[in-house]
Amino acid sequence: MKNYLPNIKSFVITVKSLINSLYKLVGLEGIVWISALIYLATYSNYNQNHFTICPLSNLGIDNCPGCGLGRSVSMVLHGQFLHSFDFHWLGIPALIIILFRIFKLIRNNFNHYFKPINKGANHA
């Protein structure tokens, strides 16, 4: 068991370093969006009735404007575009907006944290 302990410690240090770099690159908002997309990409129970916190759905209103959006994005991530429209017609635009937001977070934070030290200096 003692032989594995240095490997586990180095693995933990590597994971902490990666998480810190990811946090610097996208911030907390980006981590939340990326985690949500990973969850939706691995979500597979589309037709199963599930617990919801939607107040309109809990009141018995069937046509909630937001219900089905997560399942719609999940279907897009699985490549089932036509079924995505069955759950919610804004699934594809929502995914595009989320990906664009993640891209903007990466671009802004990359320029802030990882800019070169001698930007604009002539090196001959």
Image (tube, helix red, strand yellow):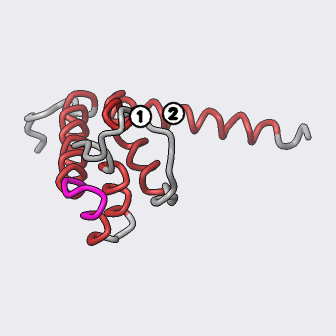
To which quarter of the image does residue 16 belong? top right
The answer to whether any part of residue 112 appears in the image is yes
- Horizontal side, residue 120 vs residue 93: left or right: left
Q: Position of residue 98 (x, y in %)?
A: 24, 45
One can see residue 31 in this view: no
Quadrant (top left, top right, bottom left, bottom right) of the C terminus: top left
Near-viewer residue (112 or 56):
56
- Kindly state the secondary structure of the residue where label 1 is placed: helix
Quarter of the image with the N terminus in it: top right
Q: Residue 86: horizontal and vertical position, in percent?
A: 28, 64
Q: Residue at x 44, y 37 (%)?
A: 52
Look at the picture and state if 3 lies above or below 74: above
Residue occupied by mark 2:
17
Where residue 93 sits in the image (x, y, percent)?
17, 54
Q: Is residue 8 above or below residue 87?
A: above
- Residue under the image location 23 percent in, 36 percent down: 105
Q: Amino acid at mark 2?
A: Ser
Q: Secondary structure at mark 2?
A: helix
Front in this rendered view, residue 101 or 9:
101
> What stretch of residues is rendered in magenta?
85-91
**As rendered, which of 58 and 121 lies closer to the eye?**
58
Residue located beneath label 1 in the image: 21
Q: Position of residue 34 (x, y in %)?
A: 37, 43
Residue drawn at point x = 83 percent, y = 43 percent: 4
Front one among 5 and 89: 89
Instruction: Residue at 32%, 30% (x, y): give it.
Output: 29
The answer to whether mark 2 and mark 1 are in CB contact below 8 A is yes
Q: For this view, does 114 lie left or right of residue 37?
A: left
Q: Is residue 42 left or right of residue 97?
A: right
| Residue 80, magenta (yes or no) | no
* Measured Cα–Cα span from mark 2 to mark 1: 6 Å
Quadrant of the rendered structure where residue 118 is?
A: top left
